């Protein structure tokens, strides 16, 4: 899981700072890990830090610094301690990095707090990209499979077909049938029907905007959208009335829904 997260973050990185942070955050154990090998790695890291600074520390000082890090920065990884050391040496942290012969918890806290500010600044955009990535993945999980989408559109077309045959009018407010049939070149339209569809669309719009009983204005509708919607549904009706349903359904398959 940790490796998978690391790979996702690496794919989303845009610069070397982000990539380096991902490597040190996900590629190392937490400083609070209780595994013996991880404890030894943390101790080795602190000892190397003291050598790097040109200072010697005794066992008591080493233990004090290790416990301080584990208690005060338990969410950091050992890799991040290593990165903080490297950044402090490059003077890339916004803090006083001189140790003044005093390698103490106070000095360590100053460096690690500055590192956290560095991490927050340099990870901000990456975390936003990761959040958007996760949202996209969730959308994909919720999206019906191609096979499910095939079944849904077939059921919709069967319903629309029955309406077209029995009522000579269909209820398809979002023009799902028209858009699907048109996209896959299944909708055959006769030129004369196009003119009739526009005329029908306008008449139906005029009728729908008034109350059937009182004939008073019922609701304010978007005329252009309503005329277009009605015209498209008219064309679907005319097409289905001349179409063999089983033959039409046999032309629809799951590959039509693969992006």
Image (cartoon, helix red, strand yellow):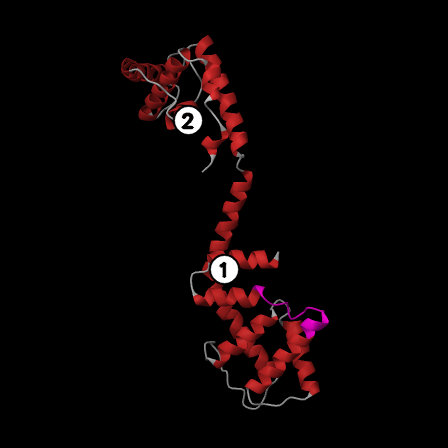
221 horizontally vs 254: left or right: left
The boundaries of the magenta stretch are 26-39
Helix, strand or loop at label 2? It is: helix
The answer to whether residue 174 shows anywhere in this view is no
| Residue to which mark 2 is pinned | 180
Can you say whether 49 is above or below 147 in the image?
below
Q: Nearer the viewer, residue 33 or 181?
A: 181
Instruction: Let me know if residue 90 is in the magenta part.
Output: no
Q: State the count of labels.
A: 2
Quarter residue 181 falls in: top left
Q: Nearer the viewer, residue 97 or 13?
A: 13
Instruction: Let me know if residue 38 is in the magenta part.
Output: yes
Which residue is pictured at 49% across the width and 70% down the height?
118
Q: Nearer the viewer, residue 176 or 150?
A: 150
The N terminus sits in image quarter: bottom right
11 horizontally vs 182: left or right: right
Point out which mark residue 10 bears. Answer: 1
Alpha-carbon distance for marks 2 and 1?
Answer: 38 Å
Can you say whether 78 is above or below 200 in the image?
below
């Amino acid at each position: 899981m940790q490796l998978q997260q690391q790979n996702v973050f690496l794919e989303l990185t845009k610069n070397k700072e982000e990539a380096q942070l991902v490597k040190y955050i996900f590629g190392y154990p937490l400083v609070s890990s209780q595994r013996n090998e991880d404890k030894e790695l943390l101790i080795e890291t602190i000892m190397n830090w003291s050598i790097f600074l040109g200072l010697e520390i005794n066992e008591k000082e080493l233990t004090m610094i290790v416990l301080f890090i584990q208690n005060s920065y338990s969410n950091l990884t050992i890799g991040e301690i290593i990165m903080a050391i490297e950044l402090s040496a490059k003077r890339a942290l916004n803090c006083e990095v001189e140790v003044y012969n005093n390698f103490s918890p106070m000095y360590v806290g100053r460096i690690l707090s500055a590192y956290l500010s560095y991490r927050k600044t340099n990870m901000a955009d990456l975390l936003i990209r990761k959040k958007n990535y996760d949202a996209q993945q969730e959308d994909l999980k919720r999206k019906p499979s191609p096979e499910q989408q095939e079944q849904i559109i077939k059921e919709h077309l069967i319903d629309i077909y029955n309406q077209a045959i029995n009522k000579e009018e269909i209820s398809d407010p979002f023009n799902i049938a028209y858009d699907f049939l048109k996209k896959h070149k299944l909708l055959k339209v006769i030129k004369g029907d196009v003119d009739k569809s526009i005329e029908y669309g306008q008449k139906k719009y005029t009728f729908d905007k008034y109350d059937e009983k009182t004939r008073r204005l019922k609701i304010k509708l978007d005329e252009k959208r309503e005329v277009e919607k009605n015209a498209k549904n008219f064309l679907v009706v005319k097409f289905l009335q001349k179409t063999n349903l089983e033959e039409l359904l046999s032309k629809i398959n799951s590959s039509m829904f693969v992006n």
